[in-house]
Image: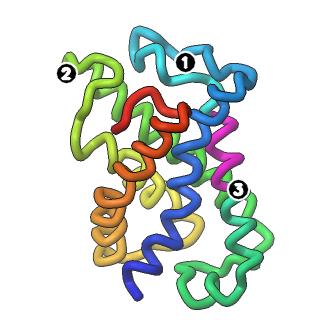
Amino acid sequence: MLILESLWFLLPLIMANQCPGFAAKLALPGSHTPVSRKWLGKNKTIAAYYAAPFGALCTLYVQRWIPLWSAKFGLFYYDRPDLWIIGIVLGVAVVIGDHAKSFIKRRIGKPPGARWWPFDQLDFVVAGIILSIPLVGWIGWQRALTMCLCVLLVHPIGNRIGYRIGIRKSPW
């Protein structure tokens, strides 16, 4: 049950993490405009700031439409009027986590696109958990650790799929 709860909570974060790649593939506005080449590298684009929240928001509303699962596996009440705020916050958290990791990566000399395990996998999850606390409350250490472990297993699979279909520039 703990794993299913963790995956259900992670789903909007995972989808939001993939959406900037979809924006680039569709050549949406800002999808090839770097936020800062110097500080983050050329691959972190402006489009992430609307694509990721959009992806998280859409995923949350799909989860809301599956009330049995949301009631059974949800860590918060999905049929709430501020669900759109949670979606935006989760999406922005994904971007902030990714950009913070990229900033640190540049500072320690790792080139853009270089593998940096486990931080490449955990950046968006940690930021999502932290930034969701004011809205949904603390999920507990056991769930937070389970989410991190789930992402370490699931994230590489999703990234490889994204890489093969052309929405990611690297398989990690």
Left or right placement of residue 172 versus residue 91 in this view: left
Q: How many callouts does the rendering have?
A: 3
The x and y percentages for residue 54 are 71, 47
Please state which amino acid type lies under the numbered disc 3.
Answer: Leu
> Label 1 to label 3, Cα distance in Å?
22 Å
Left or right placement of residue 67 versus residue 161 in this view: right
Residue density around tag 1, few if under 14, some if 14–19, many if 20 or more, within 10 Å: some
> Label 3 to label 2, Cα distance in Å?
34 Å
The x and y percentages for residue 3 are 38, 79
Disc number placed over residue 135 in the picture, else none: none
Please report the residue visible at 57 percent of the width from the left and 52 percent of the height from the top. 15
Query: Do callouts 1 and 3 mark residues in contact (Cβ within 8 Å)?
Result: no
Q: Which residue in the rendered view is the most extreme toward the top?
A: 38
The magenta segment: 49-56
In the picture, the quarter occupied by the C terminus is: top left
Q: Quadrant of residue 81?
A: bottom right
Please report the residue visible at 65 percent of the width from the left and 60 percent of the height from the top. 86
Q: Secondary structure at mark 1?
A: strand
Whichever of labels 1 and 3 marks the residue nearer the N terminus, that label is 1
Whichever of labels 3 and 2 marks the residue nearer the N terminus, that label is 3
The x and y percentages for residue 128 are 47, 55
Q: Secondary structure at mark 3?
A: helix
Please report the residue visible at 51 percent of the width from the left and 54 percent of the height from the top. 14
Q: Quadrant of residue 82?
A: bottom right
Residue density around tag 3, few if under 14, some if 14–19, many if 20 or more, within 10 Å: many
Q: Is residue 143 magenta?
A: no
Q: Can you say whether 76 is above or below 107 in the image?
A: below
Please state which amino acid type lies under the numbered disc 1.
Answer: Val
Residue ID for mark 1: 35
In the picture, the quarter occupied by the N terminus is: bottom left
Residue ID for mark 2: 108
Residue ID for mark 3: 57
